[in-house]
Amino acid sequence: MTSVDSARRTWAVVATSLVIGAIYVLRVLIPAGMDPSIFLALGEETPRQTAYAEGLLGRVVLRAAFGHDGKFFFAQANDPFYLNPDEHAAFLDQPLYRGQRMLFPLLAGGFGLFPPRVVVWAMLGLNLTALILATVVAAKLATLWGASPWLGLSVPLNLGLLSEIDIGGAGVIAMLMSLAAVYAIARQPRGVSTGLLGASLLLSLAALAREVALLFALGLVALYWLRHRVAAWQLVAFPVLGAACWRLYLVCRLSGLPSGEPEQALSAPFLGLWEAFGYWVQDPIDLAIGAVLLAVLAAFALKGIRSENLLAWGALPTIALATILSVRVWREPYDIARAIAPVLIAYPFLLFLPVAKHSPLVLSEQAFD
């Protein structure tokens, strides 16, 4: 395949991704009367956050029960540097926990310059743009590794990432940065200072979008140590340092606010999964989706741990995390799909990447000379 053919196929993948993303967004927007506040995921049982949004936007569209993350990111985006925490951060259920995820609201809020009505559209536009860019990176990564750029569709067809757009979450941004970090390493196998340093910075941004991205960085470090006895410490040290510095800033800015009740996101190993079955059996669709996700996790674990693939090892720690997630996460297929989104991208790569020696599945040891 020539470079021209590869470029054309990549653009076809990007166009397909745009169509998929647009269809999904319209599927949510049209029933809501094309009101973008549906993506703030405000809940009928969250009157404080609803009143806050109505005070800034007027009428808003509500979802059932407690809604989801978007309502908190909206408050953060209106004051991303927490200069007036009593006006905005006070409406976060857990200010320090929510505030740690700063990249998405920082960009969606235009670094604090966008008015609230613009922020609503910016949150949606940023997530859709990140989905397209992540598709581009995945397609280029597949091409670099000797596979078809159509593997890039593992991004827009990822139930977890589509769910992140649906709830106004930050997972798409985090995944984009993680994929870009892998590409930064893979495309410069001899460039330690550029490849690894660039990846470290991108992984730092991923961790500031969603702290669980630190596990992705940890997986990359584990790969190099277990396979090559090389300590690529910068891949995890920089993200941890960046997250710690931001945390210190948050403590200073939000010290006057109540800490809130911590979420019950973790439990004893496999307990959350076991309890989730009681919910899944009540809905055949949920049961089917849950069974498929479990099958993918099991198959990926067996195949991924034997590979030397950067993307696979970045996703492997997600499996360990999944075993200790609580029923609150496991019982809703879209929530557990969000949690294991890296696996849902990496598994197709493992299935369809060529295994010939010329295929650079992982950096050569020359990268650390």
Image (cartoon, helix red, strand yellow):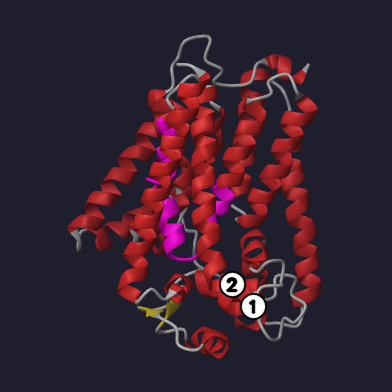
Percent across and percent down for residue 125 are 52, 61
- Marks 1/2: CA–CA distance: 6 Å
Magenta-drawn segment: 150-175
Q: Is residue 306 in view? A: no
**Residue at point 54%, 72% (across, down):** 120
Q: What numbered label is drawn on residue 86?
A: none
Dividing the picture into quarters, in which one does residue 24 lie? bottom left
Looking at the picture, which amino acid does disc 2 mark?
Val
Seen in the picture, residue 164 relative to 240 is either above or below; the reply is below
Q: 5 and 23: which one is in front?
A: 5
Q: 117 and 173: which one is in front?
A: 117
Q: What numbered label is drawn on residue 115?
A: 1
Label 1: which secondary element = loop
**Residue at point 58%, 70% (across, down):** 73
Point out the residue furthest to the top here. Answer: 357
Question: In the rendered view, does 283 fall on the left or right side of 52?
Answer: left
Looking at the picture, which amino acid does disc 1 mark?
Pro
**Residue at point 66%, 77% (across, down):** 259
Q: Is the magenta stretch mostly helix, strand or loop?
A: helix
Category of crowding for the residue at label 1, using alpha-carbon neighbours closer than 10 angstroms: few (below 14), some (14–19), many (at least 20): some
Total count of labels: 2
Q: Are marks 1 and 2 in contact (CB under 8 Å)?
A: yes
Question: In the rendered view, does 115 fall on the left or right side of 125?
Answer: right
Residue 160 lies in the magenta stretch: yes
Percent across and percent down for residue 297 are 38, 39
Seen in the picture, residue 23 relative to 299 is either above or below; the reply is below
Q: What numbered label is drawn on residue 119?
A: 2
Dividing the picture into quarters, in which one does residue 255 lie? bottom right
Label 2: which secondary element = helix
